[in-house]
Image (spheres, helix red, strand yellow):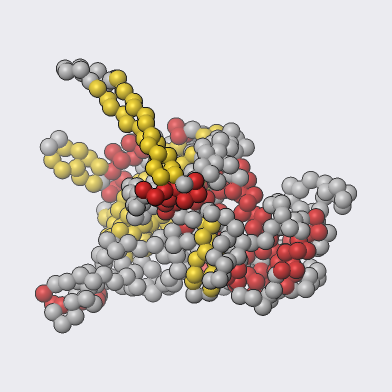
Amino acid sequence: MLIGFRLELVLQYYDPSVTMPYWNSGLDANMDTPANSILWTADYLGEMSGTVRTGICGGFQDVRGNAVIRNVGNAGSLFTSAEVRDVMRMPNINRLTEPSPYPTMESYHDDVHNYIGGSMGPIELAPWDCIFWLHHTFIDYLWEVWRYSHQYNTAYPHKNGLPAQLPDVPMKNMPVVQFLGRVPTNRDGYGVQLARKSFYQLSPTCSRQNTYCGSPDLQCRMGTNGAECAAVDRNFRARTQPLVDARRNGRVQMNFRNNHGKRRKRDTHVHHTTISHSYHITVNSQQITNIYLPQEREPCMGKPIQNNFIAGCASDVRKWAFIPIKVVHLRPQEAHFASQSDANAKNPSGYDMYDEHKYKGLKNVVKPGNPATYNDCIEDESGAFKVRLKSTGLSYFGTYTDYVFVDNRLPISSHIGYIAVEKPTANKPTEVMITASDACGRLCKPTCRKWENGNLYYVSCTGAIKVTAQSPLMYGNDFGEAVLSIWQFYGKFTPIERESNIYMEFFCDYSNEWIWKECYQKKN
């Protein structure tokens, strides 16, 4: 728990009639680019991508002894002020909790796990990244304030068909709580005894009149809902820190280090001697008129995804096989690109040359649906569009994620990616679920290979497959083998793609149909 004001003081200052911009939204989704938050630095939470080596979580290992990793920003989303307001307006506990056809506090909580990714993704590994505890403290904070604003109604809710959620069922994996003298039950979690043992610190606030949020690493942002405190952008702080130091101390010392590598003539060895020179200059604040620091270049569509290659109890890439997966993508209806041609003289800014509706032959066969869109949908003006791939072990514990890029401008485009699964053996086949979703969170339809009358087709399937060690192998024992299973090289000639070695394709057609029709029919 975060140590600070007693819960009673939080409740004393909380007014349910006040609009929610006075809430801090967890990990600063209120920033224009949350991944640029100062939280993802060595001063706070450490690396946002790859192994976490610095910050308060630096060097942490999971229960299996593997380094904690992250993939911040590749999926999911952070709590926004609008979502916090939505939680506070939920009328009762049944609306607040799962299962529900609507967003809940639990589903908003899940989005944060997915946003951080890496070790924070699987339930079994999440607690080993220290962000887990900070995130859940914030969730507990929202939960207590929701209960306060709803007059601490302790009548236990009931949801049919969920025996594990009955009031007198002991909480799973919980130790004996000393003041209760027993393992707590679900009813205890909904009561006030545990809450009275907790302490929470007030969320920082600001206003147009008082823009200081209590820390130089927080900034007051003015939005449509008023003033909100959010983390400082780490790139902005790097550029302005010398000015801040000069203002505070009257002068600033700037350190430099130049490395000059020297190699003798005709020296073919890779190794060469490096001579380093370190020096510094001190500048008085009166002398500073402008400081230029190169801005870090941010990738337009995220960074490579880091996978831990955990299968069972070990992390070993040699125990994984790589399956080629093809993604076929129809351009969604909401996409629009202003692209000129000879036919757009009357409306050059609104014409889209790539729109399939402008071509009789195309519009008769390319018919994307009209799916839901989401506020955090990531699209690029270039047309580059990310489709995420994920494998989830059914016969083993382990997940693997990656992505491919398709062209959102074109009526139809495709790309081949490679997804890893636990390598099968002669005695143990691998059962795995493979899914694909676009950068807006919309699922693509799984299809599997089928030969009919000597022709290769891909027909609807569940996405759950069994991978065996029997020939013909449709996977590679490593990433390189998987690539070579698809591409044939012929010396000076262009490599040729062998689609017959692809077992699964995902079709992103954005139709309004239920993806797994068989399940829907059985349900109804």
Quadrant of the image occupied by residue 166:
bottom right
Counting the numbered discs, the total is 0
* Residue nearest the observer in this picture, 37 or 221: 221
Residue 412 in the image: x percent, y percent?
Answer: 27, 64
- Displayed quadrant of residue 323: top left
Q: Quadrant of the C terminus?
A: bottom right
Q: Nearer the viewer, residue 293 or 524?
A: 293
Compared to residue 441, the image places residue 273 above or below, namely above
Taking the image as drawn, is residue 521 in sight?
no
Q: Position of residue 78 (x, y in %)?
A: 53, 60
Q: Residue furthest bottom?
A: 346
- Judge left or right: residue 99 versus residue 471: right
Q: Residue at (56%, 35%) from the top-left corner?
A: 59
Of residues 248 and 110, the one nearer the viewer is 248
Image position of 195 (left or right of 237): right
Left-right relation of 257 to 520: left
Q: What residue sits 65% from the left and 54% below the top?
A: 136
Give percent across and percent down for residue 313.
58, 35
Name which residue lies at 20% across and 17% down. 264
Residue 511 visible in image: yes
User: Residue 469: image x %, image y %?
Assistant: 43, 36
Residue at 38%, 57% (x, y): give it.
387
Vertical placement of residue 256 versus 105, above or below: above
The foreground one among 365 and 413 is 413
